[in-house]
Amino acid sequence: MSATYQNWYHRLLMSEYFLLVLAAILSMIASPGRLVQSIHALVFIALVVLLLYRSKTKPEQDWYKGRALAESIKTSTWRYCLRAAPFEDVTDVRVRRSEFRNHLREILRANRFIGDRIPPDSAADDQITDSMDDIRALSLEERKHYYMENRIREQRTWYMNKAGYNRTAASRWVVACTAIYAVAIILLVVRPSIPEWNFWPFEPLIVLASSIIGWMQIKKFNELTSAYTLTAHEIGIIQGRLEEVDSEEDLSEFVNEAELAFSREHTQWVARQNAL
């Protein structure tokens, strides 16, 4: 759900940017005919419709809320599988099963306002899977190894890759915007030597550069690069402590500390959600 609404939000924005550039191009026509004027009017009507639709549906809120819900369920699931607080080991595992179901119920109840947007394809599946109970039944050392391979290293790799992606994307968009500025400068220098030429695309270049700057601010490439890099380093520091864990109590404390580090971004998603 989160990925769907994220993509939808970005597509709406990209459509608006495209229409703005198109409107700027059409405005350069010195003597537009009836057809061009009609197209120009339709472009602005489409811009109004997109703006009102985006303001009404607010897909970015569903994106943030879906991400927050997913992260809450994910971190709770890992705590259950690793027998970490509040799902520590007990004589009868059915007690923890019941507590975990109640915990899920509270999470879903707190997010019931997006229930109609959650895909229904897995609603009938077991909420506590066989693999979750299989992991929970492993020995202390086996659970430590499983958590290291499938959670800590996976998360560290994910954050490192995302940091690299955002760093590269930021550089590419800066290069693109710089290229547009360079074209505008060249046109300004050449313009006096060709006075008879009337087609100078300064308006589309300005709109295109503004759209790129707006896109970079929305995507927050530099901000996410710093946040993801910091989290990856923090996970690396935490990772070394797992070897020192030699009891169920230590593992529970370690898992909760690690999940807090993983959920730092989740906290940011909740903050963004509450700010909207």
Image: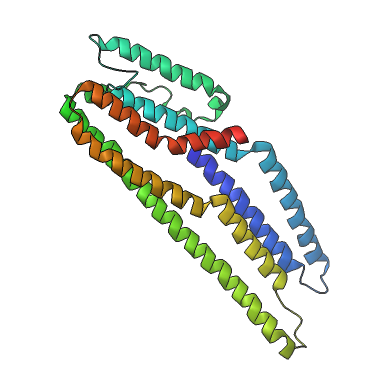
Task: Give the residue at x 77% y 67%.
Answer: 27
Residue most toward the bottom?
Answer: 193
Of 267 and 162, nearer the camera is 267
From the top left corner, tell me how far across and down residue 135 is, in percent.
23, 26
From the top left corner, tell me how far across and down residue 49 is, in percent.
73, 46
Task: Give the residue at x 61% y 35%.
Answer: 275
Name above or below for residue 210 compared with residue 115. Answer: below
Quadrant where the C terminus is found in the figure: top right
Residue 97: quarter of image: top left
Of 199 and 81, nearer the camera is 81
Q: From this viewpoint, is residue 145 visible?
A: no
Q: How is the image coloured?
A: rainbow
Q: From this viewpoint, is residue 4 visible?
A: yes
Left/right placement of residue 157 relative to residue 18 reads left
From the top left corner, tell me how far across and down residue 182 is, in percent.
60, 76
Name above or below for residue 180 compared with residue 123. Answer: below
Of 245 and 123, nearer the camera is 245
Of 201 and 166, nearer the camera is 166
Task: Give the residue at x 28% y 24%.
Answer: 252
Residue 150: quarter of image: top left
Left/right placement of residue 172 relative to residue 162 reads right
